[in-house]
């Protein structure tokens, strides 16, 4: 298991998008204390431009921003170049989180939050990127998961439903593939956190729930079955041979 983000000596670059100067400064200082480089943008439009120039390893994105909101900025940033995005929201509303994940974000945090938890989430996302590279390499020769109307190609990371390609975020794809590799088998939230996010504790189980809701929104609610109090199972479409 990857316990810490690992790569060359070059520090990670984190783009912090927050219009509250005090909070933006505090987050940037905490990131710098980790040995990473931090760049601050105060609105969505400048964040999109900064992401093009910096090519950051991670983006921390507030939803409520002037000029361009965080959801639209996230969509444009991830469309330009895949990058993990951690959204910040002042509302503990599940629908807001699902919309944020649907825009291309990989995780979310509700304000107020502790800096310790923020850094832990950032490290988890950076680990997931490194882990995804290994998984992609190992999936080059993996067989296509053909469930009739739903086809998952692990090597090309493409999902089609009824012949139409479905746009999934990297995290959504990894979650779906992890469940689909063991059809009808129940995977606990903790197991999914370990396999998809490389988290070693249960602090992010609500993140799993929100990503499942986002997947259901794109694929249909019947494909992922909830086992209350335990986790989730992939249910192949009825037309699967």
Image (cartoon, rainbow, N blue to C red):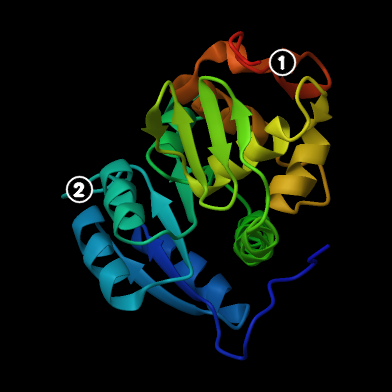
Give the quarter of the figure containing the N terminus: bottom right
Q: Which mark is residue 57?
A: none
In the image, what residue occupies the spot 41% across and 33% down? 166
Q: Which residue is mark 2?
A: 68
The picture quadrant where one finds residue 187 is: top right
Residue 241 drawn above or below residue 198? above
In front of the other: 80 or 89: 80
In the image, what residue occupies the spot 20% across and 49% down? 66
Whether residue 241 sits left or right of residue 195 in the image: it is left
Q: Residues within 10 Å of mark 2 (few under 14, many from 20)?
A: some
User: Who comes first in sequence, dot 2 or dot 1?
Assistant: 2
In front of the other: 156 or 113: 156
Q: Position of residue 168 (x, y in %)?
A: 46, 39
In the image, what residue occupies the spot 69% across and 77% down? 6
Q: Is residue 90 visible?
A: no
For the view shown, which residue lies furthest in the bottom direction?
9
Q: Which residue is mark 1?
A: 226
Q: Is residue 77 visible?
A: yes
Residue 222 drawn above or below residue 23? above
Q: Position of residue 126 (x, y in %)?
A: 61, 64
In the image, what residue occupies the spot 42% across and 71% down? 56
Whether residue 46 sits left or right of residue 122 in the image: it is left
Give the quarter of the figure containing the C terminus: top right
Q: Position of residue 104 (x, y in %)?
A: 41, 44
Whether residue 154 sits left or right of residue 204 in the image: it is left
Q: Position of residue 177 (x, y in %)?
A: 65, 39
Asked which secondary structure carries label 2, the reply is loop
The picture quadrant where one finds residue 152 is: top right
Residue 99 drawn above or below residue 28? above
**Can you tell which of label 2 and label 1 is closer to the viewer?**
1
Q: CA distance from mark 2 to mark 1?
A: 36 Å
């Amino acid at each position: 298991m990857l316990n810490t983000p690992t790569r060359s000596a070059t520090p990670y670059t984190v783009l912090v998008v927050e219009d509250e100067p005090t909070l933006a400064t505090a987050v940037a200082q905490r990131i710098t204390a980790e040995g990473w480089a931090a760049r601050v943008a105060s609105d969505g439009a400048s964040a999109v431009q900064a992401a093009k120039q910096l090519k950051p390893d991670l983006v921390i994105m507030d939803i409520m921003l002037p000029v361009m909101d965080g959801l639209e900025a996230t969509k444009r940033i991830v469309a330009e170049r895949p990058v993990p995005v951690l959204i910040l929201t002042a509302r503990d509303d599940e629908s807001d989180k699902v919309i944020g994940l649907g825009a291309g974000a990989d995780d979310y945090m509700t304000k107020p939050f502790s800096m310790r938890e923020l850094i832990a989430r950032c490290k988890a996302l950076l680990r997931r990127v490194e882990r995804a590279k290994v998984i992609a390499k190992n999936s080059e020769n993996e067989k296509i998961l053909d469930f009739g109307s739903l086809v998952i190609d692990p090597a090309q990371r493409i999902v089609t439903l009824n012949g139409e390609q479905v746009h999934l975020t990297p995290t959504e794809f990894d979650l779906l593939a992890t469940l689909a590799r063991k059809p009808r088998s129940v995977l606990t939230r903790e197991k999914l956190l370990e396999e998809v996010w490389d988290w070693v504790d249960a602090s992010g189980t609500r993140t799993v729930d929100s990503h499942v809701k986002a997947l259901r929104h794109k694929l249909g609610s019947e494909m992922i079955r909830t086992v209350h109090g335990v986790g989730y199972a992939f249910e192949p479409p009825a037309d699967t041979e």
